[in-house]
């Protein structure tokens, strides 16, 4: 079994158990990228990213987040350059999810980045009251090619 298969084998497939504490809607508080080689951290989407992630009792999930300083296109339909810039300042996807002990796997059905569609994205989480910290598995940055991980902190919306 590969590490990915071991993780998938450790999560509960199908609907989450009733009363699962991650069920709900969460607002993004911070999005930090941490480089593996030296631990350097920076705010991937600026100082005040905007976004939401939702986990539903039926096993569906969505995530969308953006920089707060995005450009505003000159017209309703962005130019190609404006569209590319808008796309590079957001993340959006939806699918189902599986829960394990401090692991959530997002099974992506549709995504802003077609390369993610049909994939399983492993996330590690820590829940502290109404604060959910989600950390990605290491991945190569599209900006500089370095290996790192993203650390996203969410607050529960009541």
Image: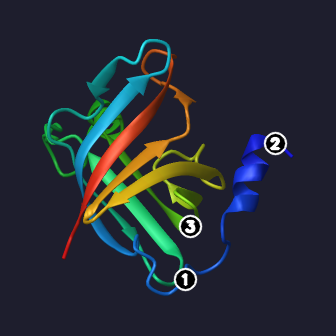
Percent of width and height locating residue 117: 60, 53
Q: Is residue 80 above or below residue 30?
A: above
Q: Relative to 123, say whether 81 is above or below.
A: above
Mark-to-mark CA distance, 1 and 3: 12 Å
Name the residue nearer the viewer: 3 or 58: 3
Q: Residue at x 58, y 50 (%)?
A: 121
Rendering coords of residue 136 (x, y %) = 49, 42
Q: Which mark is residue 17?
A: 1
* Residue positioned most to the right: 1
The nearer-to-camera label among 1 and 3 is: 1
91 left or right of 104 in image = left
**Gap between marks 2 and 1 measured at Cα:** 26 Å
Which percent across, then down, holds residue 13?
68, 72
Q: Residue drawn at (51%, 16%), measured in percent from left and top?
A: 145
Q: Secondary structure at mark 2?
A: loop
Q: Is residue 37 left or right of residue 14?
A: left
Mark 3 against mark 2, which lies toward the viewer? Answer: 2
> Which residue lies under the disc numbered 3?
97
Q: Which quadrant of the view contains residue 49?
A: top left
Q: Residue at x 30, y 71 (%)?
A: 25
Q: Is residue 85 above or below residue 157?
A: above
Label 1 crowd (10 A; few <14 / some 14-19 / many >=20): few
Location of the C terminus (image quadrant): bottom left
Instruction: Please indicate whether residue 129 sits to the left or right of residue 18 in the image.
Output: left
Q: Image quadrant of residue 43?
A: top left
Q: Nearer the viewer, residue 157 or 68?
A: 157
Q: Which comes before the other along the chain, label 2 or label 1?
A: 2
Residue 97: image x %, image y %?
A: 56, 67
Q: Tell me the tag on residue 2.
A: 2
């Amino acid at each position: 079994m590969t590490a990915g298969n071991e993780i998938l084998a450790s999560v509960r497939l199908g609907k989450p158990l009733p009363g699962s504490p991650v069920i709900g809607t969460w607002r993004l508080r911070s999005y930090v990228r941490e480089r593996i080689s030296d631990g350097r951290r920076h705010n991937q989407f600026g100082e005040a990213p905007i976004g939401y992630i939702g986990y539903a009792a039926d096993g569906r999930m969505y995530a969308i987040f953006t920089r707060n300083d995005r450009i505003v296109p000159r017209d309703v339909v962005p130019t190609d350059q404006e569209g590319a810039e808008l796309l590079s300042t957001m993340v959006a996807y939806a699918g189902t999810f599986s829960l394990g002990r401090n692991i959530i796997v997002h099974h992506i059905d549709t995504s802003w980045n077609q390369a993610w569609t049909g994939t399983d994205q492993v996330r590690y989480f820590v829940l502290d009251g109404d604060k959910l910290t989600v950390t990605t598995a290491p991945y190569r940055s599209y900006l500089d090619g370095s290996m790192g991980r993203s650390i996203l902190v969410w607050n529960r919306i009541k």
